[in-house]
Image (spheres, rainbow, N blue to C red):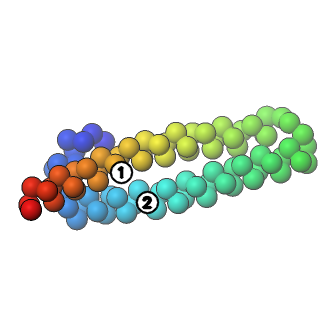
Amino acid sequence: MKPEYFTGLSDQELLQKMKKLKTNKIVDAAIIGLTIGIAIYSVAQNGFGFFTFFPLIIGYLIIKNSRNNEILYQEMQKELESRNSKRA
């Protein structure tokens, strides 16, 4: 999503999207914790191998995506703040 997209949304829609991003952040953290746990368990049981690093690769992809979500969240906050400063 581009910042220009946010100008076309109402305040309520922006708040809903921000709430959804917060929920996604919690889910992402849980999945990352799960993948790290799987990798540690795999090392303890079988040593190093492909299935040890596979969950870590998935975790990396989720972290990369969550960084993009954080940037979107910040852009949404800036848009809401600019709208509120125009009204005051």
Give the Cα separation between the discs numbered 1 and 2: 8 Å
Q: Quadrant of residue 30?
A: bottom right
Q: Residue 12 location, x and y as percent?
A: 22, 65
Q: Residue at x 31, y 63 (%)?
A: 16
On residue 40, which mark appears? none
Please rate how many residues cluster around mark 1, counting C-alpha atoms within 10 Å: few if below 14, some from 14 to 19, many from 20: some
Q: Quadrant of the C terminus?
A: bottom left
The residue tagged 1 is 73
Determine whether the residue tagged by mark 1 lies in a helix, strand or loop. helix
Q: Residue at x 83, y 35 (%)?
A: 49
Residue type marked 2? Lys
Q: Is residue 37 left or right of residue 21?
A: right
Determine whether the residue tagged by mark 2 lies in a helix, strand or loop. helix
Q: Residue 40 location, x and y as percent?
A: 80, 48
Earlier sequence position, callout 1 versus callout 2: 2
Q: Is residue 83 left or right of residue 35?
A: left
The residue tagged 2 is 22
Residue type marked 1? Tyr
| For the residues bearing labels 1 and 2, Cβ distance under 8 angstroms | yes
**Depth check, front residue: 10 or 73:** 73
Q: Is residue 41 above or below residue 23?
A: above
Q: Residue 18 location, x and y as percent?
A: 34, 58
Q: Is residue 87 left or right of residue 60?
A: left
Q: Is residue 46 left or right of residue 63?
A: right
